[in-house]
Image: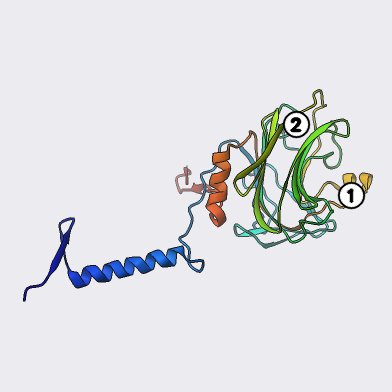
Amino acid sequence: MGRLESKQNGLSLSVGHAARLRWIAGWVGLLAASASWAVPLACATQPPDLAAWWSGEDNPLDRLGSYPGTLDHGTGYGTGFVARAFQFDGIDDSMRVGFLGGIGLTESDPVSIAAWANTSTAATATLQVIAGNYMGEQGGSGKFSMYLMINNGNLVFSVDQRQLAGISLSTPISDGWHFVTATYDGTALALYVDGEARGSNTRNFTGADANTRGWTVGNFSDETNAGHGYNSSFNGLIDEVTLFGRALSLAEIGSIFGAGAAGICTPTIFANGFEGI
């Protein structure tokens, strides 16, 4: 008796062979859908106007080279969402990154703050700063400032004129890893968690002096904490801290969140000196 054949795309396959291929393809699909085996994710295209990027790869360096950080009070590293991360103790750990020219300098300067953050104490009333320039670090002047933090079970983004005026957004957040993003276009501010928009508002003040103070990650400055009696150290891990000189779009935020542990694409330097992704 002759061999039964299935012909597809000009190829001749025996029925048995075709059945085996379908069986293999089915199992591959089931494995890809299971929690124990995942298809590797592609990294997210780097959005324009990235100004600083502290990835926490066992060093406090800015991946763009401009604003290296300084770790204080024993701040260390741990297993991050994307490779390694900064580890803060919730007591006094912090990272100072200094004055960032043109980023959060005046009330009309657009900026976005984005990071992966993981705490097991989100519900506590303690302030847990992710990043900000609220009254900054040593020296400097000016009344305009902003910060992103976790407090009392909420993610909070504030833009203010020191103690004179300000506007804040907040949204519930749970323990564990979350991709948190705050955007400010010079007028409107918005807050996102895990690629989802959680609220927006508009600046309600004007005339704030330009801020020449520095940014901090994982805490306010020692001077701010001492002067106000704060304990604002983050309790957990912060990874892939990025600052942009504009307000990111929802699509861009979703792309970074969707890339998961693959993170943002980093340039590859070829032997001829050219970069590529």
* Residue 164 spot, x, y in % from top left: 88, 30
- The amino acid sitting under disc 2 is Leu
Front position in the image: 98 or 78: 78
- Quarter where residue 211 is shown: top right
Q: Secondary structure at mark 2?
A: loop
In the image, taking residue 274 as reference, residue 187 lies left or right, namely right
In this view, 153 is above or below 141: below
Single out the residue that lies furthest toward the left: 1
* Residue 15 spot, x, y in % from top left: 18, 70
Distance between the Cα atoms at labels 2 and 1? 24 Å
* Residue 186 spot, x, y in % from top left: 70, 28
In this view, 66 is above or below 202: below
Q: Residues within 10 Å of mark 1 (few under 14, many from 20)?
A: some
Using the image, tell me which numbered label, if any, was put on residue 230.
1
Q: Secondary structure at mark 1?
A: loop
- Quarter where residue 148 is shown: top right
- Quarter where residue 188 is shown: top right
Residue 144 in sight here: no
- Which of the two marks, 2 or 1, is nearer to us in this view? 1
- The amino acid sitting under disc 1 is Tyr
* Residue 131 spot, x, y in % from top left: 74, 46
In this view, 183 is above or below 89: above
Which residue: 84% across, 46% down?
Answer: 221
